[in-house]
Image: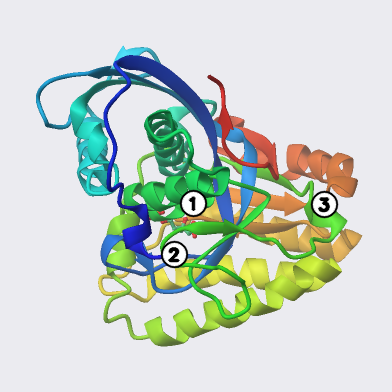
Amino acid sequence: MTEQDFVLKSYKPSVEKGSVKWSSPSNIALVKYWGKKKNQIPENPSISFTLNDCKTVTELSFTLKNEDKISFDIYFEGERSESFRPKIETFFERIAPYVPFIKSYHFKIETTNTFPHSSGIASSASGMSALAMCIMSLEKQLIPEMTDAYFNRKASFLARLGSGSACRSIEGDLVVWGTHKNVEKSSDLYGVKLEQELHDVFKDYQDTILLVDEGEKQVSSTVGHNLMHGHPFAAQRFKQAHSNLDELLNILKTGELDKFIAIVESEALTLHAMMMTSAPYYILMKPNTLKIINTIWEFRAKTGSKVCFTLDAGANVHVLYPKSEKAKVYEFIKTQLVAYCQNGAYICDAVGLGAKQLH
Ligand code: PMV
Protein backbone atom coordinates (compact mmCIF):
# COMPACT_ATOMS: atom_id res chain seq x y z
CA MET A 1 0.00 0.00 0.00
CA THR A 2 1.13 3.55 -0.64
CA GLU A 3 0.46 6.82 1.16
CA GLN A 4 -2.23 7.61 -1.40
CA ASP A 5 -4.27 4.60 -0.21
CA PHE A 6 -4.70 6.35 3.13
CA VAL A 7 -6.06 9.62 1.74
CA LEU A 8 -9.78 9.80 2.38
CA LYS A 9 -11.22 10.92 -0.92
CA SER A 10 -14.93 11.36 -0.45
CA TYR A 11 -16.87 11.44 2.77
CA LYS A 12 -19.61 13.43 4.46
CA PRO A 13 -19.31 14.43 8.11
CA SER A 14 -22.69 12.83 8.59
CA VAL A 15 -22.28 12.05 12.29
CA GLU A 16 -23.25 14.99 14.53
CA LYS A 17 -21.67 13.90 17.79
CA GLY A 18 -20.60 10.89 19.78
CA SER A 19 -17.69 9.35 21.61
CA VAL A 20 -15.37 6.38 21.23
CA LYS A 21 -12.90 4.86 23.64
CA TRP A 22 -9.82 2.68 23.12
CA SER A 23 -7.04 1.24 25.19
CA SER A 24 -3.71 0.75 23.49
CA PRO A 25 -0.52 -0.76 24.87
CA SER A 26 3.12 0.16 24.84
CA ASN A 27 5.60 -2.08 23.01
CA ILE A 28 9.20 -3.09 23.50
CA ALA A 29 11.49 -3.43 20.51
CA LEU A 30 13.74 -6.48 20.13
CA VAL A 31 15.42 -5.10 17.01
CA LYS A 32 15.52 -1.35 17.46
CA TYR A 33 14.36 1.54 15.33
CA TRP A 34 16.98 4.25 15.69
CA GLY A 35 17.38 6.74 12.87
CA LYS A 36 14.68 8.08 10.60
CA LYS A 37 14.00 9.92 7.39
CA LYS A 38 11.26 12.56 7.01
CA ASN A 39 7.81 11.83 8.53
CA GLN A 40 8.93 8.95 10.74
CA ILE A 41 10.10 6.77 7.86
CA PRO A 42 12.54 4.41 9.58
CA GLU A 43 16.09 3.92 8.38
CA ASN A 44 15.84 0.23 9.25
CA PRO A 45 13.18 -2.35 10.05
CA SER A 46 12.36 -3.11 13.68
CA ILE A 47 10.34 -5.74 15.54
CA SER A 48 8.65 -5.54 18.94
CA PHE A 49 6.67 -7.45 21.48
CA THR A 50 3.35 -5.72 22.07
CA LEU A 51 2.84 -5.35 25.83
CA ASN A 52 -0.31 -6.14 27.75
CA ASP A 53 -0.58 -4.02 30.88
CA CYS A 54 1.29 -0.77 30.16
CA LYS A 55 -1.52 1.00 28.36
CA THR A 56 -3.08 4.34 27.57
CA VAL A 57 -6.86 4.59 27.71
CA THR A 58 -8.28 7.40 25.58
CA GLU A 59 -11.84 8.58 25.12
CA LEU A 60 -12.51 10.86 22.18
CA SER A 61 -15.75 12.84 22.22
CA PHE A 62 -16.60 14.70 19.04
CA THR A 63 -19.08 17.40 18.07
CA LEU A 64 -19.63 18.66 14.56
CA LYS A 65 -18.88 22.40 14.17
CA ASN A 66 -19.05 24.96 11.36
CA GLU A 67 -15.47 26.18 11.29
CA ASP A 68 -12.97 24.14 9.26
CA LYS A 69 -10.02 24.05 11.67
CA ILE A 70 -8.36 21.79 14.22
CA SER A 71 -9.96 22.26 17.63
CA PHE A 72 -9.65 20.15 20.77
CA ASP A 73 -9.42 20.12 24.56
CA ILE A 74 -7.22 17.61 26.29
CA TYR A 75 -7.60 16.12 29.76
CA PHE A 76 -4.88 13.95 31.29
CA GLU A 77 -5.86 11.84 34.33
CA GLY A 78 -8.96 14.00 34.78
CA GLU A 79 -7.17 17.35 34.68
CA ARG A 80 -7.11 19.77 31.80
CA SER A 81 -3.61 19.49 30.32
CA GLU A 82 -1.87 22.15 28.29
CA SER A 83 1.50 20.37 28.28
CA PHE A 84 0.29 17.70 25.82
CA ARG A 85 -1.33 20.26 23.52
CA PRO A 86 1.67 21.02 21.21
CA LYS A 87 2.33 17.30 20.56
CA ILE A 88 -1.33 16.61 19.75
CA GLU A 89 -1.63 19.75 17.67
CA THR A 90 1.35 18.62 15.56
CA PHE A 91 -0.14 15.13 15.32
CA PHE A 92 -3.50 16.45 14.10
CA GLU A 93 -1.81 18.69 11.55
CA ARG A 94 0.24 15.79 10.22
CA ILE A 95 -2.70 13.41 9.91
CA ALA A 96 -5.23 15.96 8.57
CA PRO A 97 -4.41 15.28 4.88
CA TYR A 98 -5.43 11.62 5.45
CA VAL A 99 -8.40 12.26 7.78
CA PRO A 100 -9.65 15.70 6.65
CA PHE A 101 -12.89 15.27 8.64
CA ILE A 102 -10.99 15.99 11.87
CA LYS A 103 -11.20 19.69 10.97
CA SER A 104 -15.02 19.51 10.99
CA TYR A 105 -15.20 18.41 14.64
CA HIS A 106 -14.38 19.78 18.05
CA PHE A 107 -12.76 17.03 20.15
CA LYS A 108 -12.56 16.39 23.83
CA ILE A 109 -9.68 14.00 24.48
CA GLU A 110 -9.62 12.32 27.89
CA THR A 111 -6.62 10.14 28.48
CA THR A 112 -5.06 8.13 31.29
CA ASN A 113 -2.12 5.75 31.56
CA THR A 114 -2.07 2.51 33.54
CA PHE A 115 1.55 3.21 34.48
CA PRO A 116 2.79 6.18 36.50
CA HIS A 117 3.38 9.28 34.39
CA SER A 118 6.72 9.95 36.03
CA SER A 119 7.92 6.37 35.52
CA GLY A 120 10.15 7.25 32.59
CA ILE A 121 8.14 4.81 30.45
CA ALA A 122 7.48 6.55 27.17
CA SER A 123 3.74 6.98 26.83
CA SER A 124 4.02 8.19 23.25
CA ALA A 125 3.61 4.70 21.71
CA SER A 126 0.50 3.83 23.73
CA GLY A 127 -0.83 7.41 23.68
CA MET A 128 -0.49 8.04 19.96
CA SER A 129 -1.81 4.59 19.02
CA ALA A 130 -4.85 4.97 21.32
CA LEU A 131 -5.68 8.34 19.75
CA ALA A 132 -5.14 6.96 16.23
CA MET A 133 -7.60 4.13 16.99
CA CYS A 134 -10.18 6.66 18.22
CA ILE A 135 -9.81 8.73 15.03
CA MET A 136 -10.22 5.58 12.95
CA SER A 137 -13.38 4.67 14.88
CA LEU A 138 -14.81 8.04 13.86
CA GLU A 139 -13.73 7.44 10.24
CA LYS A 140 -15.48 4.05 10.42
CA GLN A 141 -18.69 5.79 11.48
CA LEU A 142 -18.39 7.98 8.37
CA ILE A 143 -17.38 5.07 6.10
CA PRO A 144 -19.04 1.98 7.63
CA GLU A 145 -17.97 -0.38 4.83
CA MET A 146 -14.28 -0.10 5.84
CA THR A 147 -12.60 -3.49 6.47
CA ASP A 148 -10.91 -4.33 9.77
CA ALA A 149 -7.62 -4.85 7.93
CA TYR A 150 -7.76 -1.34 6.46
CA PHE A 151 -8.82 0.07 9.84
CA ASN A 152 -5.76 -1.38 11.59
CA ARG A 153 -3.38 -0.52 8.79
CA LYS A 154 -4.48 3.08 8.61
CA ALA A 155 -4.48 3.38 12.42
CA SER A 156 -0.86 2.20 12.41
CA PHE A 157 -0.07 4.62 9.56
CA LEU A 158 -1.58 7.54 11.53
CA ALA A 159 0.07 6.49 14.80
CA ARG A 160 3.44 6.47 13.02
CA LEU A 161 2.98 10.12 12.12
CA GLY A 162 2.57 10.86 15.85
CA SER A 163 5.50 8.81 17.11
CA GLY A 164 7.32 6.23 14.99
CA SER A 165 7.26 3.28 17.37
CA ALA A 166 3.55 3.89 18.11
CA CYS A 167 2.74 2.17 14.81
CA ARG A 168 3.82 -1.12 16.42
CA SER A 169 1.17 -0.91 19.19
CA ILE A 170 -2.02 -1.56 17.22
CA GLU A 171 -1.78 -5.34 17.05
CA GLY A 172 0.14 -8.13 18.76
CA ASP A 173 1.89 -10.31 19.63
CA LEU A 174 4.87 -9.36 17.47
CA VAL A 175 4.89 -6.50 15.03
CA VAL A 176 7.38 -5.62 12.31
CA TRP A 177 7.71 -2.08 11.05
CA GLY A 178 9.97 -1.18 8.15
CA THR A 179 10.50 -2.97 4.89
CA HIS A 180 12.37 -6.25 5.23
CA LYS A 181 12.92 -8.69 2.42
CA ASN A 182 11.73 -11.69 4.41
CA VAL A 183 8.64 -10.21 6.01
CA GLU A 184 5.76 -10.34 3.64
CA LYS A 185 3.78 -7.10 3.35
CA SER A 186 6.27 -5.26 5.59
CA SER A 187 6.25 -1.52 5.04
CA ASP A 188 7.99 1.65 6.12
CA LEU A 189 4.56 3.27 6.39
CA TYR A 190 2.98 1.08 9.09
CA GLY A 191 3.53 -1.91 11.33
CA VAL A 192 2.36 -5.40 10.37
CA LYS A 193 1.59 -8.28 12.69
CA LEU A 194 4.17 -11.01 12.22
CA GLU A 195 2.20 -13.74 10.50
CA GLN A 196 4.81 -16.51 10.46
CA GLU A 197 4.81 -19.46 12.85
CA LEU A 198 5.70 -18.43 16.42
CA HIS A 199 7.26 -20.83 18.94
CA ASP A 200 5.05 -21.29 22.02
CA VAL A 201 7.68 -19.91 24.36
CA PHE A 202 7.27 -16.42 22.88
CA LYS A 203 3.48 -16.33 23.06
CA ASP A 204 3.45 -15.40 26.73
CA TYR A 205 6.97 -13.99 27.21
CA GLN A 206 7.31 -11.89 30.36
CA ASP A 207 8.65 -8.35 30.63
CA THR A 208 9.33 -6.83 34.04
CA ILE A 209 10.25 -3.18 33.65
CA LEU A 210 12.69 -1.96 36.27
CA LEU A 211 12.27 1.77 36.82
CA VAL A 212 15.82 2.93 37.34
CA ASP A 213 15.28 6.59 36.69
CA GLU A 214 11.89 8.21 36.85
CA GLY A 215 13.13 11.59 35.69
CA GLU A 216 12.80 13.34 32.37
CA LYS A 217 15.33 12.13 29.74
CA GLN A 218 18.25 14.50 29.06
CA VAL A 219 18.07 13.88 25.31
CA SER A 220 14.77 13.22 23.56
CA SER A 221 14.27 10.40 21.04
CA THR A 222 13.66 12.99 18.32
CA VAL A 223 17.10 14.50 18.90
CA GLY A 224 18.63 11.01 19.14
CA HIS A 225 17.13 9.86 15.82
CA ASN A 226 18.43 13.00 14.16
CA LEU A 227 21.94 12.36 15.44
CA MET A 228 21.99 9.25 13.24
CA HIS A 229 22.26 11.58 10.22
CA GLY A 230 25.96 11.70 9.43
CA HIS A 231 26.72 9.27 12.28
CA PRO A 232 30.01 7.47 11.53
CA PHE A 233 28.49 4.01 12.14
CA ALA A 234 25.00 4.62 10.73
CA ALA A 235 25.25 2.66 7.48
CA GLN A 236 26.69 -0.38 9.24
CA ARG A 237 24.07 -0.19 11.98
CA PHE A 238 21.16 -0.06 9.52
CA LYS A 239 22.59 -3.08 7.71
CA GLN A 240 23.01 -4.94 11.00
CA ALA A 241 19.35 -4.37 11.93
CA HIS A 242 18.33 -6.12 8.70
CA SER A 243 20.49 -9.15 9.43
CA ASN A 244 19.53 -9.27 13.13
CA LEU A 245 15.86 -9.23 12.15
CA ASP A 246 16.50 -11.97 9.63
CA GLU A 247 18.10 -14.16 12.30
CA LEU A 248 15.44 -13.33 14.84
CA LEU A 249 12.68 -14.38 12.44
CA ASN A 250 14.15 -17.84 12.46
CA ILE A 251 14.67 -17.89 16.25
CA LEU A 252 11.03 -16.90 16.77
CA LYS A 253 10.10 -20.14 14.97
CA THR A 254 12.61 -22.45 16.64
CA GLY A 255 12.53 -21.03 20.18
CA GLU A 256 16.34 -21.07 20.53
CA LEU A 257 16.60 -18.86 23.59
CA ASP A 258 20.39 -18.53 23.74
CA LYS A 259 20.35 -17.09 20.25
CA PHE A 260 17.36 -14.89 21.17
CA ILE A 261 19.29 -13.48 24.13
CA ALA A 262 22.39 -12.79 22.04
CA ILE A 263 20.46 -10.71 19.52
CA VAL A 264 18.18 -8.89 21.94
CA GLU A 265 20.95 -7.84 24.34
CA SER A 266 23.25 -6.84 21.49
CA GLU A 267 20.48 -4.72 19.97
CA ALA A 268 19.96 -2.91 23.30
CA LEU A 269 23.65 -2.20 23.76
CA THR A 270 24.06 -1.18 20.13
CA LEU A 271 21.24 1.34 20.50
CA HIS A 272 23.06 2.92 23.43
CA ALA A 273 26.42 2.62 21.66
CA MET A 274 24.93 4.74 18.86
CA MET A 275 24.08 7.41 21.42
CA MET A 276 27.55 7.25 22.96
CA THR A 277 29.23 7.61 19.57
CA SER A 278 27.09 10.38 18.07
CA ALA A 279 28.16 14.03 17.89
CA PRO A 280 27.39 15.31 20.43
CA TYR A 281 27.68 12.06 22.42
CA TYR A 282 25.52 11.30 25.42
CA ILE A 283 24.66 8.49 27.84
CA LEU A 284 21.14 7.62 28.94
CA MET A 285 22.09 4.60 31.03
CA LYS A 286 22.66 5.20 34.75
CA PRO A 287 25.07 3.38 37.08
CA ASN A 288 22.17 1.20 38.26
CA THR A 289 21.34 0.24 34.66
CA LEU A 290 24.81 -1.32 34.43
CA LYS A 291 24.52 -2.91 37.87
CA ILE A 292 21.30 -4.60 36.76
CA ILE A 293 22.83 -5.81 33.49
CA ASN A 294 25.82 -7.30 35.30
CA THR A 295 23.63 -8.94 37.92
CA ILE A 296 21.48 -10.52 35.18
CA TRP A 297 24.63 -11.87 33.49
CA GLU A 298 25.91 -13.32 36.79
CA PHE A 299 22.53 -14.91 37.55
CA ARG A 300 22.36 -16.42 34.08
CA ALA A 301 25.87 -17.82 34.32
CA LYS A 302 25.16 -19.31 37.75
CA THR A 303 21.70 -20.77 37.16
CA GLY A 304 21.39 -21.37 33.42
CA SER A 305 18.29 -19.16 33.41
CA LYS A 306 17.21 -17.68 30.07
CA VAL A 307 16.48 -14.27 31.56
CA CYS A 308 17.84 -11.34 29.53
CA PHE A 309 17.48 -7.58 29.23
CA THR A 310 16.67 -4.95 26.73
CA LEU A 311 16.64 -1.16 26.95
CA ASP A 312 14.74 1.57 25.23
CA ALA A 313 15.95 5.14 24.96
CA GLY A 314 16.37 5.62 28.70
CA ALA A 315 17.84 4.16 31.87
CA ASN A 316 15.05 1.69 32.64
CA VAL A 317 15.67 -2.01 32.07
CA HIS A 318 13.17 -4.40 30.52
CA VAL A 319 13.82 -7.86 31.97
CA LEU A 320 12.61 -10.49 29.51
CA TYR A 321 12.04 -14.18 30.37
CA PRO A 322 9.90 -17.19 29.48
CA LYS A 323 6.75 -17.70 31.54
CA SER A 324 8.03 -21.10 32.70
CA GLU A 325 10.71 -19.21 34.69
CA LYS A 326 8.29 -16.70 36.18
CA ALA A 327 8.55 -17.75 39.84
CA LYS A 328 12.35 -18.12 39.76
CA VAL A 329 13.03 -14.86 37.93
CA TYR A 330 10.53 -12.92 40.01
CA GLU A 331 12.31 -14.05 43.14
CA PHE A 332 15.63 -13.00 41.58
CA ILE A 333 14.21 -9.59 40.67
CA LYS A 334 12.83 -9.02 44.16
CA THR A 335 15.95 -10.10 46.00
CA GLN A 336 18.69 -8.84 43.68
CA LEU A 337 17.41 -6.19 41.27
CA VAL A 338 14.71 -4.12 42.95
CA ALA A 339 17.36 -2.47 45.12
CA TYR A 340 18.65 -0.74 41.96
CA CYS A 341 15.22 0.71 41.08
CA GLN A 342 14.27 4.25 42.02
CA ASN A 343 11.92 3.96 45.02
CA GLY A 344 11.95 0.17 44.44
CA ALA A 345 9.56 0.65 41.53
CA TYR A 346 8.97 -1.93 38.79
CA ILE A 347 6.09 -3.02 36.55
CA CYS A 348 5.23 -6.60 35.63
CA ASP A 349 4.04 -7.00 32.07
CA ALA A 350 3.91 -9.65 29.36
CA VAL A 351 3.28 -10.03 25.66
CA GLY A 352 -0.15 -8.75 24.64
CA LEU A 353 -2.43 -8.66 21.65
CA GLY A 354 -2.84 -4.96 20.89
CA ALA A 355 -5.40 -2.18 21.12
CA LYS A 356 -8.94 -2.84 22.36
CA GLN A 357 -12.11 -0.87 21.81
CA LEU A 358 -13.90 -0.06 25.06
CA HIS A 359 -16.88 1.65 23.42
O1 PMV B 1 9.11 6.20 18.54
P1 PMV B 1 10.23 7.03 19.03
O2 PMV B 1 10.57 8.14 18.11
O3 PMV B 1 10.04 7.49 20.46
O4 PMV B 1 11.56 6.12 19.03
C1 PMV B 1 11.70 5.05 19.91
C2 PMV B 1 12.94 4.31 19.63
C3 PMV B 1 13.30 3.20 20.60
O5 PMV B 1 12.35 3.04 21.60
C4 PMV B 1 14.63 3.52 21.26
C5 PMV B 1 13.48 1.90 19.84
C6 PMV B 1 12.23 1.28 19.30
O6 PMV B 1 12.31 0.66 18.24
O7 PMV B 1 11.17 1.37 19.96
Upstream in the sequence, badge 1 or badge 3? 1
- The span from disc 2 to disc 3 (Cα, nearest Å) is 36 Å
Q: Which mark is residue 75?
A: none
Residue 216 vertical placement versus 55 (above, below) = below
| Residue type (three-letter) at the residue carrying disc 2 | Met
Relative side of 232 to 265, left or right: left
Q: Where does ligand 1 appear, by image quarter?
A: bottom left
Please tell me whether residue 176 is drawn above or below residue 64 in the rendered image: below
Residue type indicated by callout 1 = Arg
Q: Please state, as top left, top right, bottom left or bottom right, where the N terminus lies in the image.
A: bottom left
Q: Position of residue 106 (x, y in %)?
A: 22, 21
- Disc 1 marks which residue? 153
SS type, badge 1: helix
Label 1 – label 3 distance at C-alpha = 30 Å
Horizontal and vertical percent for residue 279?
26, 74
Q: Earlier in the sequence, mark 2 or mark 1?
A: 2
